[in-house]
Image (cartoon, rainbow, N blue to C red):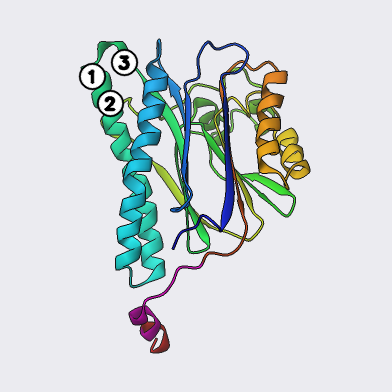
């Protein structure tokens, strides 16, 4: 079942006001319900290479694997777990490709990227991330961050050295503790959350929250919720108006209607006799 008619999504990416080139990458497969955003790092154009590899790899691996899973699925709940594993494993594969590329090409030495991705299936969404690229949810005028940064600052907050308010004012936000390409393996954090009709999901690079307060992001999405393209453009503009010190990328997705997975005849019989 294609999810193309089940939700709208827009992607906006901008170099910002300071950087010379854009090291962010974004992508989507609307049929599968897959959204991916990566924020590269490294000298010269290496960050751009890393983020591009990450997004391409996930977009290449996840849709066919999901199609096979849906075709062979007998139980939607088990299939949902498999979808999450597929997403996690694709990001792990991207990590290996980036790491190997950096070893083989001297100009790419030290490159890496953060990543956040989500995959919609059976009225839920699987979320996977590494680093400080984020995913937020806007639901009935409530705006909340669903991912937690893999950063030194977040670790200090978790250990009680900083409050969230102090962290928001800190100038040391960008020291990430996890990134793709740094080592041969990486720990990908995954979660699954329920989706409701009308939800808006925001994936963004750190160029947005570093420049724009969460309250202003919330207000912008609330104001332009009927026009996702305008909302995305306004968020990028806000980042640039506040200095634009980094590349800024956003993906916005709004759920239009439910998308329950179709149960096989075998799964229906199992429910009857449970």
Which residue is the site of mark 3?
A: 108
Where, quadrant-wise, is the N terminus in this rendering? Answer: bottom left
Please name the residue shown 37% across and 17% down the image. 46
Q: What is the x, y in percent for residue 151?
A: 49, 28
Which region is colored magenta? 260-269
Q: Position of residue 40 (x, y in %)?
A: 44, 23
Which quarter of the rendering shows the C terminus?
bottom left
Q: Is residue 187 visible?
A: no
Q: Residue at x 48, y 49 (%)?
A: 30
**Rendering coords of residue 106 (x, y %):** 26, 11
Q: Residues within 10 Å of mark 1 (few under 14, many from 20)?
A: some
Q: How would you rate the neighbour count of disc 3 (Cα within 10 Å): few for under 14, some for 14-19, many for 20 or more?
A: many
Give the left or right position of residue 13, taking residue 40 as reference.
right
Seen at 31% across and 33% down, the residue is 95
Element type at mark 3:
helix
**Residue tagged by mark 2?**
99
Question: What secondary structure is found at the residue carrying circle 2?
Answer: helix
Q: In the displayed structure, does residue 147 sit left or right of residue 108?
A: right
- Badges 2 and 1: C-beta atoms under 8 Å apart? yes
Choose the circle earlier in sequence order: 1 or 3: 1
- Between the C-alphas of marks 2 and 1, the distance is 6 Å
Give the residue at mark 1: 103
Quarter of image, res 183: top left
Q: Does residue 72 lie above or below 235 as drawn?
A: below
Image position of 140 (left or right of 81):
right
From the viewer's perspective, is residue 7 above or below residue 259?
A: above
């Amino acid at each position: 079942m294609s999810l193309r008619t089940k939700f709208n999504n827009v992607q906006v990416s901008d170099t910002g006001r300071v950087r010379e080139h854009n090291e962010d990458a974004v992508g989507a497969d609307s049929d599968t319900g897959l959204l991916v955003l990566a924020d590269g790092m490294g000298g010269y154009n290496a960050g751009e290479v890393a983020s591009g590899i990450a997004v391409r790899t996930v977009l290449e691996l996840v849709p066919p694997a999901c199609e096979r899973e849906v075709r062979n699925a007998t139980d939607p709940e088990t299939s949902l777990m498999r979808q999450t594993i597929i997403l996690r494993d694709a990001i792990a594969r991207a990590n290996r490709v980036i790491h190997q590329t950096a070893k083989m090409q001297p100009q790419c030495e030290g490159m890496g990227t953060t990543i956040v991705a989500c995959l919609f299936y059976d009225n839920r969404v699987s979320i996977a991330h590494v680093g400080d690229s984020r995913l937020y949810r806007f639901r009935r005028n409530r705006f909340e961050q669903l991912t937690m940064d893999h950063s030194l600052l977040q670790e200090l907050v978790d250990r009680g050295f900083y409050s969230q308010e102090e962290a928001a004012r800190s100038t040391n936000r960008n020291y990430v503790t996890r990134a793709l390409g740094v080592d041969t393996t990486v720990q990908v954090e995954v979660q699954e959350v329920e989706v409701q009709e009308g939800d808006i999901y925001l994936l963004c690079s750190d160029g947005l929250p570093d420049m724009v307060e969460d309250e202003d992001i919330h207000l912008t999405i609330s104001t332009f919720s009927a026009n996702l393209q305008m909302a995305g453009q306004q968020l990028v503009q806000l980042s640039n108006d506040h200095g634009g010190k980094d590349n800024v990328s956003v993906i916005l997705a709004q759920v239009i209607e439910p998308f329950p997975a179709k149960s096989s005849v075998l799964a229906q019989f199992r429910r009857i006799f449970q």
